[in-house]
């Protein structure tokens, strides 16, 4: 059976979206429903893929099919390409599987040439209209298909307008437009060295190629990456008979949604313009009218349109976004698709459609994109105030939400100001772990360096704090405590500033914010999701505050409590540093004894915040030198505290330097060389659990997680320390409780030897951040230097640190799951990398049989919904 | 069936080595052969393993078996434990599967107590002998079993000797010794709080435990790691009836080899002492006599011994190393084992045994340890001169061989002196890639920092140059050009120095060296190995000199030619740096055009050296900043050359800094961002091949290897650049030739997606250095900080960068082989990591079906022999 590459609208339907693209499939579906659709055909996405495979040429067989479909559609429309008496004119539009509005190119009025333009004039008795259409076509074709600068045409048009004293295009007469066409054709010839193509079939094939090419233009590539659209899908091309909304006052064009896309309200919502083409609506030269006004102008057409809207919404069982044209009083449907909507609208529409009996709850859940929920969980700007504000700069939207506060340039200053009751925004060149406390008290964080995965971005997302990162055109001088914009305006400490973490905009003024509103619809959808999902959702939280926040968002436990973050606080870092530079076990134990009560208090706070929900505590993970001071003054202070010679301390710090800290002395390797660290942490975990039990009667089940294990014996060594210490604590306290010891699977060797490791580990938690780094062989901190080139060259389509790489990293995860279960069938399995809150990764985790995902508190609702999607999608598969 | 843990000598044989240990199995075998062996029993290695499993206790069932075997052996020897009339005395010795001489503990004369010592005195009519035996036993038991400091006993003995005016132990009378015994027992009681154990059965069980414990003493752990002996093997314990070589002038003891272990000469070789115990021979207080002297003293015993020696050699079909004791004129065999021998002896014995018809060639090959060959391939010191020399320091034996030359402290000085005809030794704090030229001209390299895998060590091994690394007690001042020893002796530039890269010794004088001698036996063994093996052996070589050296050692091609090493030469580094700091593609191409002719000349030299053997050329791999200057003066010079502002250049260099260079912008990532680099390298590879063909008629088949690939599309992107450039060159030159494009598999993701990658790659070469780093998640440069702790805690038993980790890394390699072959059944497979020259890794490579291994030139013979072993061992399995 030979492949079919071209389909008449009457040959397709909505289920053929992958082949015909969204637009093409829906045009076919509407044709099937008997709706008034200008007829034509779709060149399939497979033809596009083939075009690229064939070295960017359209093969003979595809050409033949296009010509055959063209002939049939001429017959259906009863018009002919190039026929002066009754010319067939078409639009050529791209249409991928997923909607990519504005990303690819469109050509209207194709089929016009020096002869057919006269035929069109006669047929419509409107010479001006015909030549206006022709000049638009020449301009569009030259620009989109042949790469002639659009501005050159605009210059000609402006010159003619000036010469004729015309203010607007509509002031030009038919003769004026004939002159424009003449000049346009001359320009084309000058630019391309040949006459403007007169043969409609050639025009068509070149236009189809141009659409195929546009699939790979830079803005389309970026759009795909931001929206997770695979590069190998390709685009279809829709060739459709032209209808004209600009044939006079009985013609018009418009767009409408079956419900309000901002609020979800069930009421037709849209706008239209009489005597206009689609581009006029978009261009904004004339102000369109609300769709309800159409009832007054053309009541019958309005009635017909509202009926069609209802038919379409009922048929698709979702809010529709429609385009229509009225040609001389006759309504034509040009497009329908499921409408894009705000998060709030998505929730309302989904809940309403269930109430209306149009969707089941499961179907409704699939209508809400988990990623959208994020917008609902953060403060937003007061929208009126925002409209008036003008950004002073724009960085990367690193962590969503809106923030307004006074500007501070050091963590210490921010902490002090916050203690004094001020709302603060922390601005830094880039942040480091030492800034944690300052970040914690800030409304928002602004950096001039670093990307979406910089320290500032990662930590801010974890905290749910608004962050704009990598704002390169701001000159931040931390010492001077000033920030200067590209325009030379300087802000100082204490000045008001506002950040929009969802757009990356920075405002040099105070803009009011309002807190997140978790509406009733949100609660409804979450309840439905919880009823469906089987995957548990935990959170990554290091403080009682984060833990409480996460519980509020529905977290069912802590999947990752990073003990090291606790050590950066001002009152602890000294003891931590003392521990690190200790030369003997005795010195080290002395320092650890100072840390023990603090760490125990931390755990108690977290246990209390979590009630009896499980808490996974990861033992010390980062390279020790991260805790050490770098400034001379700090080093001197530490030397004094510890009664050490300054030079010796500098030497010790230098000896801790690592060539590749990510691949260095960290994780459980620290416990192997300094078992006393693991002893102290075990003691803190267990004593805290005992005390909380004694104080509040809560039964805590601590899960102790050993990081960076690559070998069974390594885990056993540390586990033995833990078990022996626990025994001692039990004996001392005369109390016992249950606890578990498990490991992170984050080193490739752990994944491939998971059967051995499961002999020791009672649970696995996949640390997919590190696992991604080591599996790809690039570090998150360094990959920024080249990943953009990888996207541009279509080698990678998404950031593997954001979206789990299922092909490579996922294969290792799956292997580890299978090997682990072979040894220990009831092993508890989870994931605690950043991927735990990314919907496609959550679905993957469900499918391979994990018990839970763990993510930052603000991603918990996203993960809950994605986990429900996973169940529903698996049923459908 | 219950397990049997204890075997009488009469119950075992030589094939039970794993269970009985080498010593035990051979005692059993000799018993079976009817040779005069004092009878006893062996507690098996499994009992040792069980001892550790049972928490370091001997279980009841093993105790029962020991007691039963004891009873039977009492019967066989017709003596009884604790019998005053006829006491049974035993030796208790460890005996692992592999010989670990001196690593574990031995106890003699066990069974003596206050009663049996009198019995022994009566039985031998020698009170002095009996008490001497008893005091030796008390001392040995107290030290080895009970942990009482040996020196405390020595003090007592010395005090008694002083009091009695005795110079030697033998000057003490029976009464003196009785006094010593009394004092020893008092000391024991004081130290341990109880009387010295009188019950022989208790003595025995405690002694067995002590031997088990000694398996895990620190020196045994280190020995095992150095000799690749797994920690879970455990040791057996041999309990054997005592015979005494010190019962008078008709008694004696000795050791002998059936052939000369230094040369392999076929002649009984050994020494003996009359009226002595084994420890006296070792202690060196009396000078032993050559074994041939025994013929004069006791001709019959000598005859009996030479007959037994022949029986044993014929039986074991290998050179034997034997221990014997003569008790009152009667010969007893205490041990036989295959004798350790020098590399030269190993070759001669193997070749001779084939000539004598005792071994097949394949059997003979297995008698030679591939690792031993290394010693034959490097220069050695003149042995007489060496004996007189005294080391001034000792570092790590980082690269074998002997070197003698004048001391220089910078690469530049070394190069100049070498040009002037001097032999030089380069001493540095540590070396860096910029020192390559200096290292290249040196006889030997000495560093005060860095380990066995430091830059100096790795590069020196690759070059086959002698290197002593990490000589921490030498203070090297590069600026002052001085080196000071721990004794305060200072050496300056131009002073003579000698290095022994096989021991790590450093000598402050000139010691004559002699070049490697590849004897006839070497050639014979290599020829036999080549006839057997199926795995090809290539070399890693970056220069024509190394390539020629490798061909001389039998290399069949180049498996890894690192193009970056060529760029460190003084005349190239400038152009390289210019390329790196270029801001535009145009600038970069300009710099690359300067590099092209140099790189082409390099390749031509290498092609010529290799004849028509295949050459795999790896494209630029390291992070670019490795090439940049770090000294202010060099940066200034570069800025001047490139007409750049100094500050801008500093800024550019800083921007190239990476947090984790190993996981940064390197490998094919460079070609993805700067395709023009790959274009230049392709052009150099292909143009060089064409020119060599035109000049010499040689048909070169270049294999272009793209490093650090992790994704098929990444490889395709670079491969397309290569293919397109090749097409251009072919068109320009009007010549074509065959070439291949393949990739390194060194990133875990490449291994798990090897089926996809094989769509593009015509060959895989496993880069197991990087693959090990990423699979384990630790970098070679940083792991030194903690790997020692891992060995000590028995988590890892060998350095995974030296010996391929078959469990983890090997699993990924195997997976990649299988996936790659699924896509491309005839894919060419090789390995080019350092493991390619390590025997156990070579065998693994053979077993999983690789086509070749590639290693540094000096390891080529090792790999050839190991590859032959692989075939023979596979047949035996």
Image (spheres, coloured by chain):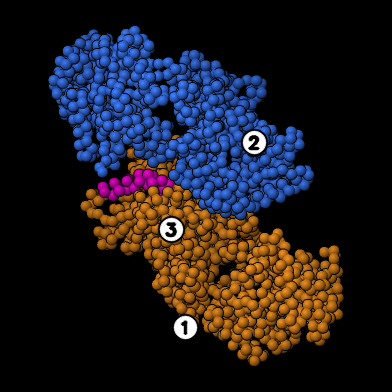
Chain colours: A blue, B orange
| Viewer-closest of B459 and B231 | B231
Q: SS for tag 2?
A: loop
Q: x, y (%) of residue B747? A: 46, 49
Chain letter behind tag 1: B
Q: Is residue B70 visible?
A: yes
Q: Residue at x 13, y 21 (%)?
A: A84
Q: Which mark is residue B357?
A: 1
Instruction: Tell which circle, 3 or 1, labels the residue nearer the N-terminal end.
Output: 1
Most frequent secondary structure within the magenta stretch: helix
Q: Residue B43, relative to residue A638: is it above or below? A: below
Q: SS for tag 1?
A: loop
What's drawn in magenta, residue-wise? B704-728
Q: Quadrant of the C terminus of chain A?
A: top left
Chain letter behind tag 2: A
Q: x, y (%) of residue B476? A: 58, 54
* Mark 3 → mark 1, Cα distance in angstroms: 37 Å
Q: Residue at x 49, y 14 (%)?
A: A384
Is residue B437 shown left or right of residue A22? right
> Same chain for marks 3 and 1?
yes
Q: Which mark is residue A613?
A: 2
Q: x, y (%) of residue A300? A: 31, 11
| Viewer-closest of B877 and A412 | B877
Residue B712 within the magenta-colored segment of the rendering: yes
- Residue at mark 3: B831
Q: Residue at x 50, y 20 (%)?
A: A507
> Same chain for marks 3 and 2?
no
């Amino acid at each position: 059976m030979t492949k079919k590459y071209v389909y008449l609208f009457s040959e397709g339907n909505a289920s053929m979206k992958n082949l015909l693209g969204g637009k093409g499939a829906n045009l076919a579906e509407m044709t099937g429903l008997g709706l008034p659709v200008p007829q034509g055909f779709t060149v399939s996405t497979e033809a596009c893929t083939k075009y690229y495979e064939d070295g960017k040429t359209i093969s003979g067989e595809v050409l033949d099919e296009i010509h055959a479909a063209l002939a049939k559609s001429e017959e259906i429309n009863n018009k002919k390409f190039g026929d002066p008496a009754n010319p067939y004119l078409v639009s050529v539009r791209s249409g991928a599987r997923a909607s990519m509005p504005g990303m690819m190119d469109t050509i209207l009025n194709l089929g016009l040439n020096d002869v057919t333009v006269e035929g069109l004039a006669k047929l419509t008795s409107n010479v001006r209209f015909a030549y206006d259409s022709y000049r638009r076509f020449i301009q569009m074709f030259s620009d989109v298909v042949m790469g002639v600068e659009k501005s050159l045409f605009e210059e000609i048009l402006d010159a003619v307008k000036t010469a004729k004293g015309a203010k607007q295009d509509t002031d030009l007469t038919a003769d004026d437009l004939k002159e424009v066409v003449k000049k346009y054709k001359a320009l084309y010839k000058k630019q391309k060295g040949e006459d403007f193509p007169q043969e409609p079939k050639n025009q068509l094939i070149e236009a189809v190629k141009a659409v195929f090419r546009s699939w790979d233009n830079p803005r389309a590539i970026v759009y795909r990456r931001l929206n997770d659209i695979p590069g190998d899908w390709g685009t279809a091309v829709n060739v459709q008979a032209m209808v004209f909304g600009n044939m006079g006052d009985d013609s018009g064009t418009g767009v409408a949604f079956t419900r309000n896309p901002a609020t979800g309200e069930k009421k037709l919502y849209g706008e239209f313009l009489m005597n206009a083409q689609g581009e006029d609506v978009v261009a904004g030269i004339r102000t369109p009218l609300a769709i309800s006004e159409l009832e007054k102008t053309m009541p019958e057409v309005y009635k017909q349109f509202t009926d069609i809207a209802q038919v379409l919404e009922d048929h698709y069982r979702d809010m529709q976004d429609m385009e229509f044209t009225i040609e001389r009083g006759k309504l034509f449907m040009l497009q329908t698709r499921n409408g894009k909507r705000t998060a709030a609208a998505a929730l309302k529409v989904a809940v309403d459609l269930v109430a209306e009996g149009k969707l089941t709850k499961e179907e409704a859940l699939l209508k809400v994109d988990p990623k959208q929920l994020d917008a609902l969980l953060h403060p937003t700007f007061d929208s009126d105030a925002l409209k008036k504000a003008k950004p002073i700069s724009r960085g990367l939207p690193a962590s969503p939400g809106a923030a307004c506060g006074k500007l501070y340039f050091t963590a210490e200053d921010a902490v002090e100001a916050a203690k004094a009751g001020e709302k603060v925004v922390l601005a830094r060149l880039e942040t480091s772990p030492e800034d944690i406390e300052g970040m914690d008290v800030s409304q928002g964080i602004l950096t001039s360096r670093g990307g979406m995965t910089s320290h500032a971005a990662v930590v801010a997302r974890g905290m749910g704090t608004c962050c704009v990162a990598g704002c390169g055109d701001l000159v931040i001088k931390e010492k001077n405590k000033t920030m200067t914009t590209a325009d030379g305006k300087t802000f100082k400490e204490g000045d008001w500033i506002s950040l929009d973490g969802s757009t990356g905009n920075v405002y040099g003024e105070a803009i009011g914010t309002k807190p997140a509103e978790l509406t009733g619809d949100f609660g409804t959808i979450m309840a439905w999701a919880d009823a469906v999902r089987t995957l548990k959702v935990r959170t990554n939280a290091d403080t009682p505050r984060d833990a409480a926040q996460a519980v509020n968002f529905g977290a069912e436990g802590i999947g990752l409590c990073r003990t090291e973050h606790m050590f950066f606080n001002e009152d602890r870092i000294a003891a931590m540093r003392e521990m690190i530079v200790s030369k003997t076990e005795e010195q080290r134990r002395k320092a650890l004894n100072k840390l023990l009560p603090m760490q125990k208090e931390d755990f108690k706070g977290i246990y209390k915040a979590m009630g009896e929900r499980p808490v996974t505590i990861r033992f010390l993970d980062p390279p020790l030198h991260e805790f050490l001071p770098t400034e001379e003054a700090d080093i001197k202070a530490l030397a004094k505290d510890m009664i050490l010679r300054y030079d010796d301390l500098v030497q010790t710090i230098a000896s801790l330097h690592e060539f590749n800290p990510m691949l260095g002395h960290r994780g459980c390797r620290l416990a192997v060389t300094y078992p006393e660290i693991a002893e102290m942490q075990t003691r803190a975990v267990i004593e805290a659990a005992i005390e909380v039990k004694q104080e509040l009667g809560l039964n805590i089940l601590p899960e102790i997680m050993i990081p960076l294990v690559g070998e069974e014996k390594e885990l056993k060594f540390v586990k033995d320390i833990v078990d022996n210490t626990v025994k001692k604590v039990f004996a001392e306290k005369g109390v016992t409780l249950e606890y578990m010891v498990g490991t992170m699977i984050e080193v490739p060797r752990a994944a491939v030897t998971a059967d051995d490791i499961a002999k020791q580990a009672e649970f696995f938690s996949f640390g997919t951040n590190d696992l991604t780094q080591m599996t790809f062989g690039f570090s998150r901190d360094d990959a920024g230097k080249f990943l953009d080139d990888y996207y541009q060259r279509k080698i990678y389509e998404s950031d593997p640190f954001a979206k789990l790489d299922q092909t490579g990293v996922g294969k290792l995860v799956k292997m580890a799951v299978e090997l682990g279960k072979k040894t220990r069938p009831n092993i508890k399995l989870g994931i605690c990398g950043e991927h735990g809150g990314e919907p496609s990764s959550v679905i993957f985790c469900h499918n391979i049989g994990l018990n839970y995902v763990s993510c930052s508190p603000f991603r918990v609702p996203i993960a809950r919904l994605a986990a429900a999607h996973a169940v529903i999608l698996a049923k459908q598969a």
